[in-house]
């Protein structure tokens, strides 16, 4: 496997500094072509897509690309494709109706006890499968201090909200001080018990997990606010030693980490890849939580698989690995309908005295009906 040599002269102290990684993200066609060499169709796609959805790739993540494989799963998640310009019937600009369910700017409140705080429009890397392409990377969607104050005030006066998802963009694009301010504000609201930090930086910029961030998480956990970190590892090649170390630093603060893999065609839509991914995640003390079916967002149709493919993966995991490694397969319904979990059918039929099930080996097993009416 051959990787870019563009960063061989970079001092380790710079490479391991998340601010250096952030400042040196690859953003232009010439930079990207010089670092990894682009095929003609990739150059055309870059030019065609640049005004539709930004390109930004950290040197770290760019260094994971296999230069000998144009279908490398890292490459496909980071580099634009001409298929992003296609819109399929049924796709929506805002597939989950997040804007429709915003009582105040920057806060989506769909479920009774949960709310999503849109903390920033920035990301370390702009993933090509992003469900918020309509706004991520757009400075006009940035949450100002007035908006944040209004969002926190809505949470404060809504006692039903006990769980706040801090999302974006990527909230780890914010400074440690800014994150501490948000955690402090949430901790001061008596009915808020849980804060979930939604970030992909463990995958695309693990250097971001510095001692300052660990201190912020540790201090916030010491109060009544329980913090969970939710991330998106989508392929085993993303489970590097650097990512493992970042996860260890997070877990050491008392913060559990859960993974929400996005099911992506040509990247992880097979049982072998997902099995290997989940085995590696468990070794990193990251719980596979969700397999997310790709939303009906515009510009990501080429990543979408069939529902049957997702169900076949869950079926292939069950019984063949620890239940710790078997996530829920969920579809987030359009128009704010919420998530529904899908499972392979295990019950085959029912007779007067028995229920017949099919186990993970395909065997049919009869279970007697024993209960009182």
Image (tube, helix red, strand yellow):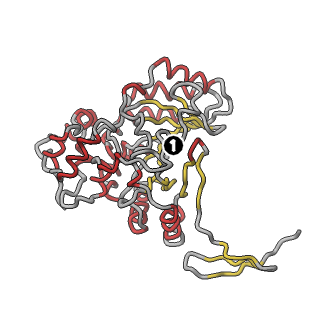
Furthest toward the front, the residue is 89
Q: Which residue is mark 1?
A: 95
Pinpoint residue 252: horizontal percent, then vertical percent: 43, 44
The residue under the point 31% across, 57% down is 73
The foreground one among 67 and 337 is: 337
Numbered label tally: 1
Pinpoint residue 315: horizontal percent, then vertical percent: 53, 69
Furthest toward the right, the residue is 373
The residue under the point 35% across, 61% down is 266
Quadrant position of the C terminus in the picture:
bottom right
Residue 340 in the figure: left or right of residue 302: right
63 up-or-down from 336: above or below: below
Furthest toward the left, the residue is 9
Residue 147 in the figure: left or right of residue 212: right
The residue under the point 39% across, 46% down is 299
Q: Residues within 10 Å of mark 1 (few under 14, many from 20)?
A: many
Q: Quadrant of residue 85?
A: top left
Helix, strand or loop at mark 1: loop
The foreground one among 255 and 355 is: 355
Residue 196 in the figure: left or right of residue 74: right
Pinpoint residue 39: horizontal percent, then vertical percent: 18, 53
Furthest toward the top, the residue is 146
Quadrant position of the N terminus in the picture:
bottom left
Pinpoint residue 290: horizontal percent, then vertical percent: 51, 54
């Amino acid at each position: 496997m051959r990787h870019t040599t563009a960063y061989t002269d970079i001092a380790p102290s710079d490479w391991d500094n998340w601010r250096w990684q952030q400042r040196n993200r690859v953003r232009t066609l010439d930079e990207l072509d010089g670092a990894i060499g682009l095929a003609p169709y990739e150059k055309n796609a870059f030019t065609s897509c640049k005004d539709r959805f930004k390109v930004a790739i950290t040197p770290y993540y760019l260094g994971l690309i296999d230069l000998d494989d144009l279908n490398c799963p890292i490459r496909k998640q980071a580099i634009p494709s001409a298929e992003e310009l296609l819109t399929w019937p049924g796709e929506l600009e805002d597939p989950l109706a997040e804007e429709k369910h915003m009582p105040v700017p920057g806060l989506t409140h769909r479920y009774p006890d949960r709310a999503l705080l849109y903390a920033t429009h920035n990301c370390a890397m702009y993933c090509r499968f992003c469900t918020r392409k309509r706004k991520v990377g757009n400075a006009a969607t940035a949450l100002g201090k007035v908006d944040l104050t209004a969002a926190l005030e809505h949470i404060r006066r809504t006692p039903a909200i006990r769980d706040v998802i801090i999302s974006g963009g990527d909230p780890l694009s914010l400074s440690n001080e800014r994150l501490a301010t948000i955690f402090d504000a949430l901790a001061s609201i008596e009915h808020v018990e849980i804060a979930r930090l939604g970030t992909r930086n463990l995958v695309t910029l693990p250097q971001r997990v510095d001692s300052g961030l660990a201190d912020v998480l540790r201090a916030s956990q010491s109060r009544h606010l329980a913090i969970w970190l939710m991330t998106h590892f989508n392929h085993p090649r993303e489970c590097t030693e650097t990512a493992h170390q970042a996860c260890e630093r997070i877990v050491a603060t008392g913060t559990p980490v859960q993974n929400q893999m996005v099911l992506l065609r040509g990247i992880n839509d097979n049982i072998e890849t997902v099995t290997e991914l989940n085995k590696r995640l468990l070794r990193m003390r990251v719980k596979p939580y969700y397999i997310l079916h790709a939303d009906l967002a515009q510009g990501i149709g080429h990543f979408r698989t069939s529902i049957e493919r997702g169900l076949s993966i869950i079926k292939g995991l069950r019984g063949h690995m620890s239940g710790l490694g078997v996530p829920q397969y969920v579809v987030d319904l359009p128009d704010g309908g919420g998530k529904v979990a899908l499972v392979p059918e295990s019950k085959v039929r029912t007779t007067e005295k028995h229920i017949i099930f099919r186990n993970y080996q395909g065997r049919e097993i009869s279970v007697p009906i024993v209960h009182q009416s």
